[in-house]
Image (tube, grey):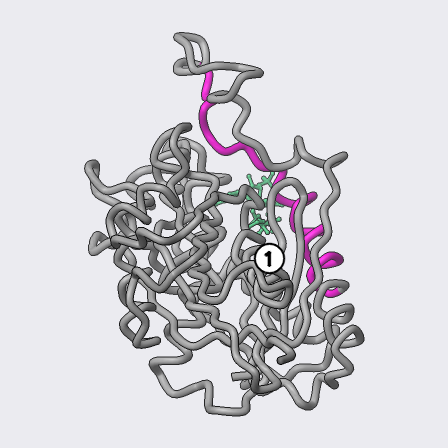
Amino acid sequence: MKRFAHVIGTGASVPARVLTNSDLEKMVDTEDEWIVSRTGIKRRHIASDNEASSDMATKAALNALESANVKAEQVDLIILGTVTPDRPLPSTACLVQNNIGAVNAAVMDIVAACSGFVYGLALAKAMIESEQADTILVIGAETLSKIVNWKDRNTCVLFGDGAGAAVVRVSGKPGGILGTYMRSNGSLWNLLTVPAGGSRMPIDFNSMQNGARYIQMAGPDVYKNAVMAMGEAASEVLSRTGVSSKEIALMIPHQANIRIIESTANRIKIPPEKVYVNIHEYGNTSAASIPIALDEAMRGGRIKPGDKVLMVAFGGGFTWGSAIVEF
Ligand code: UT7
């Protein structure tokens, strides 16, 4: 039997606490008007002190399993994209495995920043087609609020927390994940980085004082690269799959900046009504942004059986990628 990798369920979870632009006006020298016009963000959800990536990932995974009508014991692989693991060791995927009781699964974290979920879909497709797994949970989960410098207006207005998940399962029926594309460019790593906290610069008194344990981003440079790379990733996956942009029912882009989203859609001639946007509510949740949007779109009736959905992402590393999924 030829094996196809179908997305059969989705889930998401975001923290209850909401931080609005007017809350931020009281914290740093910024304005609601600047944030909305430059980014499209109005609110973001922020984890509480005792909430970590695995907590949100667990809830998203359970929601996804429920919507797919799959039991945790049936999962044989968990792929979790995050740059904000609960701790350096073990992987956050291990914690999720334990929390949901996926006792028969192999698990791994992948660090592809905002591209984590589309990278995860690419791996899931390959693992299913090569008969190495039948039922896979692909999760994106981030608690960026814990690595953001709340005194740096260049970054703190941009990010939010949350998790999203999808169940990908083997089927003999053609369709599912039709094609994927993954790229990276490590020569530009220093444009978006958290300098401290690894083996190069362990957390110490200095990094606690000088901000090296927080996200540092050269915003306009990242912006330019994101526009180019997301356009390329979207075009490339269309040509690899032979799907025309007219056939795309919905584009779900990584939600980093409304202007990047609009320029990506323009480049491949997808009209605004076919572009899913929820950046106003969540900000940039890195690896979680596409699966949160996917889950909202599924539950909101924006995706119907037979629809082809294009997902496209860009993030630190740099990494970028895309996927087309037929539902
Ligand atoms: O998720 C992965 C990838 N991440 C991205 O894709 C993010 C990419 N970058 C961006 O989205 C945009 O570059 C930003 C939203 C970060 C910045 O927008 P921009 O239009 O590129 O603004 P800018 O950095 O050129 O800053 C314009 C001005 C500066 O002031 P001066 O130097 O012109 O006087 C900034 O200091 O806006 C100032 N500024 C702010 N003003 C009010 C920067 N942050 C703020 C702020 N509030 N929060």
Residue under label 1, please give it.
Answer: 123
Q: Name which residue lies at 51% across and 61% down.
A: 133
Residue 174 placement: quadrant: bottom right
Residue 150 placement: quadrant: top left
Query: Residue 235 location, x and y as percent?
Result: 76, 71
Query: Residue 140 location, x and y as percent?
Result: 44, 54
Residue numbers of the magenta segment: 210-231
300 vs 39, left or right, is left
Of residues 150 and 194, the one drawn nearer to the viewer in this rendering? 194
Helix, strand or loop at label 1? It is: helix
Query: Residue 272 location, x and y as percent?
Result: 58, 82
Q: Quadrant of the N terminus?
A: bottom right
The majority secondary structure of the magenta stretch comes to helix
Q: Amino acid at mark 1?
A: Leu
Of residues 103 and 59, the one drawn nearer to the viewer in this rendering? 103
Residue 103, compared with residue 232, is above or below; it is above
